[in-house]
Image (spheres, rainbow, N blue to C red):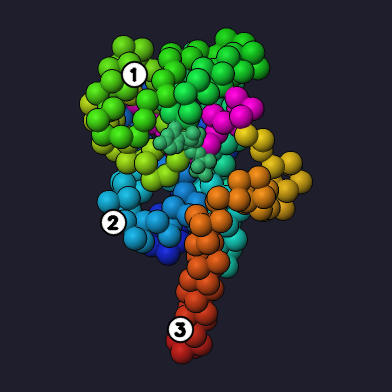
Amino acid sequence: MSSIRILGVRVDDVTMPSTLAVIARMIREGGAHQIVTVNPEFIMRAEREPAFAAVLERADLAIPDGQGMLWAARLLGRPLQARVAGSDLVPLLAEQSAREGHRLFLLGAAQGVAEIAASCLEGRYPGVRIAGTHAGSPRVEDDAESRARIRDSQPDVLLVAYGAPAQDMWIARNQPHLQVPVAIGIGGSLDFIAGVQKRAPLWMREHGLEWLYRLIRQPWRWRRMAVLPVFAGRVLAVRLQGRKEKRCDG
Ligand code: UDP
């Protein structure tokens, strides 16, 4: 599997089918694998928080989540094959679970949402194996209870919905104390599955406008999204610098 770096952060060049295959392999292998879903907000956050950057660097799989990643990769001359959004991955993992018997644990989201998401997945993918659900919280003082519940239900895949970086830091801190082969931070995916939040229509997703839809529905996001133009500017600057160097080399 090849990887590229965008503003210093590693991203693996995967597709949805190859991601599902890698996850199935990780489950077969056992051990503890962390998967991160990198988007431009992650990259800008990693710049400010070395601990988060270290977690992204150590991840066993870094999937390109968001159209911004594809845009940046293309501009930097190392195009990625596909966008692999966490919100698209979770339903497909449920489908794979129904087929292969993998057990999923849903951790996070507001009180009650993980339970609703679990029953929606059970309705949509008969045979899906939900090992357990728990809202918990990303606070360190709640780690012990969440860990105990996860240990009791012995999942193969732990999906953590606390938003970044909290979910990824939670996994890095707690996975060594769990026997879960795969853990993935999944942002707001449980809200979408449970119908608590609506996803952008397909045409908007296909045109890279999911961020705009989320901004209109949840205006409080503007503060988080304010980093997006900064990200774009930084990528453009790297590209211009690269061109200048090429000219000088030639
Ligand atoms: N969340 C949570 N506890 C917290 C903070 C967030 O359970 O202390 C959940 C929140 O309910 C939502 C998810 O974390 O389900 C984060 O979703 P968001 O849409 O912010 O993530 P994104 O998809 O943008 O990464």
User: Rounded to the nearest whole Å, what is the CA distance between mark 1 and mark 2?
Assistant: 28 Å
Measured Cα–Cα span from mark 1 to mark 3: 51 Å
3D distance between C-alphas at marks 2 and 3: 29 Å
Seen from the viewer's position, the closer of residues 14 and 135 is: 135
Q: Amino acid at mark 2?
A: Pro
Q: Is residue 179 magenta?
A: no
| Residue shown at the point (47%, 44%) measured from the top left | 37
- The foreground one among 29 and 109 is 109
Q: Residues within 10 Å of mark 1 (few under 14, many from 20)?
A: many
State whether residue 101 is above or below residue 219.
Answer: above
Looking at the rendering, the stretch of residues picked out in magenta corresponds to: 181-196
Q: Earlier in the sequence, mark 1 or mark 3?
A: 1
- Residue 150's label in the rendered image is 1
Residue 223 as seen in the image, left or right of residue 207: left
Residue at 32 percent across and 41 percent down: it is 169
The image position of residue 150, as x and y in percent, is 34, 18
Can residue 22 be seen here? The reply is no
Against 7, residue 237 (above or below) is: below
Along the horizontal axis of the image, is 43 left or right of 148?
right
Secondary structure beneath dot 2 equals: helix
> Which badge, 1 or 2, comes first in the chain's sequence?
2
Could you tell me which secondary element the residue under label 3 belongs to?
A: helix
Nearest to viewer (mark 1 / mark 3): 1
Label number found at residue 50: 2
* Label 1 element class: helix
Between marks 2 and 3 in the image, the one whose residue lies nearer the viewer? 2
